[in-house]
Image (spheres, coloured by chain):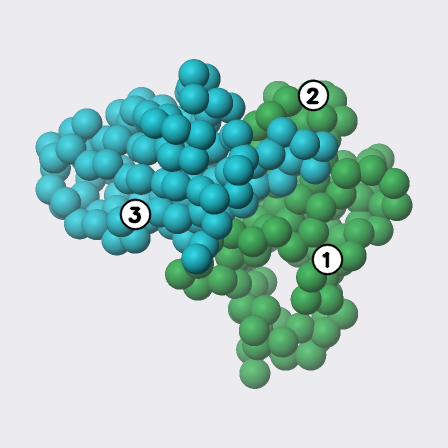
Amino acid sequence: DADVTQTPRNRITKTGKRIMLECSQTKGHDRMYWYRQDPGLGLRLIYYSFDVKDINKGEISDGYSVSRQAQAKFSLSLESAIPNQTALYFCATGSQGFTGELFFGEGSRLTVL
Amino acid sequence: AQSVTQLDSQVPVFEEAPVELRCNYSSSVSVYLFWYVQYPNQGLQLLLKYLSGSTLVKGINGFEAEFNKSQTSFHLRKPSVHISDTAEYFCAVRPNTGNQFYFGTGTSLTVIP
C-alpha cells in the first residue's frame, strides 16, 4: 500500500458543486501539504498543516478550505467548484527532521465542467 | 522571498546522450535543494537532495547534481539517458529557517530512441 493515499484519483464535476479530496498517510509525519499542479506553472501550495491544530494558507488558498481530522488525515474542499480549479492536486507529507523532504501521493485529477 | 527558475520547459535528447537540466534559485537565506521526478500518471519522487557538505550530490537512477553557491544554481545531470528517463523534473528549495518548499515550473525531458 502507498504511504500517502489520495482519493478519489479522478473526479469530474460541475460548476457550483462541493468537492472533497482526501489524503491519508501511514508515514507518521506531522506535516501535511496540499499542492495544485497546472501545466507550465509547476506546483503551487494551497494549504499546509504542521499538526492537527495548526492550519496555514499557502499562496493560492482562495476558493479552498482544509480539515486536519487526525495526524494521518488531511482533506481539501472546494465549496463551490469553478472551471479554473480544474487541475491535478497532490497531497504531500514531511517530517520535522533535518532532511525535511516531501513525500507525495499519486495525485487527484479534478475536472470542473 | 524565494524563487526557483527552471530555464528549459522542454528538453528532447537522444537515447544514451548526456543531459543537463538547469535550475537557478533566489533566496535571502541559505537553502536546502531538491530534485524531484514525476513519471506519467504518478506523483513526485525524490531524485536527490543537497543539505550540506560536498557540492556534488548523487541520486537514484544515475542522476547527479552540483550545487554552485556563487551562481545560485543546482543543475541536474546524467551522462547517458534511457527511454525510461522520460518524465517531468522539478527543482525545489526549502529555506533552512522555514518549512515551505518552493518549486520550479518543471522541465519535461523526452528521450528519443
Using the image, tell me which numbered label, if any, was put on residue A7: 3
Query: Which residue is denoted by mark 1 in the rendering?
Result: B59
Amino acid of disc 1:
Gly
- Where residue B52 appears, as percent x and y from the top left, is 83, 38
Q: Residues within 10 Å of mark 2 (few under 14, many from 20)?
A: few
Q: Residues within 10 Å of mark 3 (few under 14, many from 20)?
A: some
Chain B in the picture: what colour?
green
Mark nearer the N terminus (2 vs 1): 1
Closer to us: mark 3 or mark 1? 3
Amino acid of disc 3:
Thr
Give the CA distance from mark 2 to mark 1: 24 Å
The answer for which chain carries disc 3 is: A
The verdict on a common chain for dots 2 and 1 is yes
Residue A39 seen anywhere in this rendered image of the structure: no
Q: How many marks?
A: 3
Q: Quadrant of the N terminus of chain A?
A: bottom left
Drawn side of residue B85 relative to residue A72, left or right: right
Q: Quadrant of residue A21?
A: top left
Residue at horizontal 48%, vertical 23%?
A51
Q: For the residue labelled by badge 3, is the local secondary structure a helix, a strand or a loop?
A: strand
For the colour cyan, the matching chain is: A
Give the CA distance from mark 3 to mark 2: 33 Å
Q: For the residue labelled by badge 1, is the local secondary structure a helix, a strand or a loop?
A: loop
Residue A66 seen anywhere in this rendered image of the structure: yes
In contact (CB < 8 Å): disc 3 and disc 1: no
- Where residue A112 appears, as percent x and y from the top left, is 18, 43
In the picture as drawn, the residue positioned furthest to the bottom comes out as B113
